[in-house]
Image (cartoon, rainbow, N blue to C red):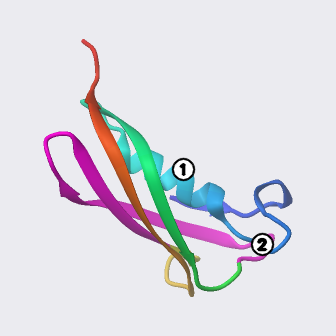
């Protein structure tokens, strides 16, 4: 997922939580399941700047019948500096239908 960090998406220190949130949500939801994220740990390693193109990638690392664990990173650009690392836990629900 690529996001351009605009002034409306950045905190005063330039963090990029919105991009990570969107990437975690995308990883937790698919055609069969709706994920509800119950915990998130974000380790900020470097600040992002307004105007940066951010590349967030989150994947499912482990699963039980009811829950998933996701990990991911956010970089400045596709091959750029590592800005943050995320770990999230989500409850998996089947979609009605």
Residue 79 % position (x, y): 49, 83
Q: Is residue 66 left or right of residue 59?
A: left
Given residues 52 and 16, the one toward you in this image is 16
Q: Tell me the residue at 76%/57% (across/down).
A: 9
Name the residue nearer the viewer: 58 or 94: 94
Please tell me whether residue 94 is drawn above or below residue 87 in the rendered image. Answer: above
User: What is the number of the mark on residue 22?
Assistant: 1
Specify which label sits upstream in the sequence, 2 or 1. 2
Q: Reply yes or no: does residue 53 show up in magenta.
A: yes
Q: Residue at x 55, y 53 (%)?
A: 21
- The numbered dot on residue 44 is none
The range drawn in magenta is: 48-73
Q: Which mark is residue 14?
A: 2
Q: Residue 14 lies in magenta, yes or no? A: no
x, y percent for residue 7? 85, 60
Residue depicted at 26% across the width and 50% down the height: 68
Local SS, label 2: loop
Instruction: Residue 36: name its quadrant.
Output: top left
Is 12 left or right of 58, judged from the image as shown?
Answer: right
Place of residue 66 in the rendered image (x, y in percent of width and height, measured from the top left): 20, 40
């Amino acid at each position: 997922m690529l996001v351009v960090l605009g002034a409306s998406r950045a905190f005063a220190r330039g963090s990029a939580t919105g991009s990570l949130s969107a990437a975690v949500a995308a990883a937790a939801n698919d055609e069969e399941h709706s994920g509800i994220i119950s915990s998130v740990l974000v380790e900020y390693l470097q600040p992002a700047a307004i105007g940066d193109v951010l590349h967030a990638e989150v994947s499912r690392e482990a699963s039980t019948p009811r829950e998933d664990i996701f990990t991911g990173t956010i970089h400045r650009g596709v091959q750029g500096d590592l800005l943050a690392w995320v770990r999230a836990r989500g409850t998996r629900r089947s979609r009605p239908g």
